[in-house]
Image: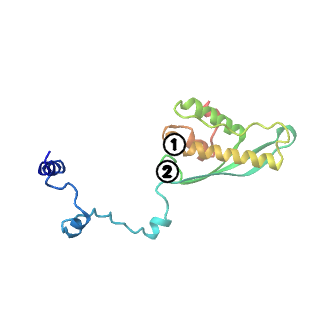
Amino acid sequence: MSSSNSASQSSSVLGSSRPFASMSDRSHSSNISFEARPEIKQQTFDEIYGVPENFLEIEVKNPQTHGFARKMFTDYEIICRTNIPAFKLKSSSVRRRYSDFECFRDILERETTRVTIPALPGKVFTNRFSDEVIEHRREGLERFLQIVAGHPLLQTGSNVLCAFIQDPQWDKNQWM
C-alpha cells in the first residue's frame, strides 16, 4: 500500500466533513442557540402565607371523664378546620367516646373495600382512667382520624366520614 493510498483511506474513513467542531471552531460561530430558561415568577405574600388550596386540620383534644364507678367513660373533642368541599362545615367541634370511634371504624370497613382502615389504639382494661392512658389513647385517636379524614377516596366516597367528624347529633345506631 502506498503512502498516498493510505492517506486517502484515512481521509475517507474520517470523511471530508468533520462531524464535530473543535472548540476553536465553536468560539467563532455566531449561530449558537441556548435554550431559554423558564421565567421564574416571584410569589406574592398571599401565595406564600395565604390559605392553602386544600387544607384539613383534625385535632382530638380535651378528654373529659364522666360518671362514676362502673358507669365511667371518657369522651374527646374533635376539632376540624378545612376548606375541602366534601366537608359541609369549614370549622366544627364535636365530642365522641372511644366506643363511637369503634363503631365509626366498623362502618368505614363495611362501606369501602378499596381502602385499608387503620387500627384504633387498643382497649385498656386496667387503670384506663389514668392521665397517661387517656393521653396515649387521645394521641392514637387523633392519628387515626388524621389518616382516615385525609384519605382522598374516603373524603369523596364515604357517607359516614363527614357526619362523624362534624355532626354533633351523630348517632351510631343510625349507621348500623
Outermost residue, right side? 69
Front residue of 77/36: it is: 36
Viewer can see residue 167: no
Where residue 124 appears, x then y in whole percent?
A: 79, 38
Tell me if mark 1 has few (under 14), some (14-19) or many (20+) residues whose alpha carbon lies within 10 angstroms of its own.
Answer: some
Residue at screen point 62% across, 30% down: 176
Question: In the shown orientation, is residue 41 left or right of residue 23?
Answer: right
Front residue of 32/51: it is: 32
Q: Residue 155 carries which label?
A: 1
Which residue is label 2 attached to? 84
Residue at screen point 84% across, 47% down: 130
The answer to which image quadrant residue 162 occupies is: top right
Please, what is the three-letter code of the amino acid marked with disc 2? Ile
Compared to residue 49, the image places residue 171 above or below, namely above
- Whichever of labels 2 and 1 marks the residue nearer the N terminus, that label is 2
Q: Which mark is residue 129?
A: none
Please, what is the three-letter code of the amino acid marked with disc 1? Gln
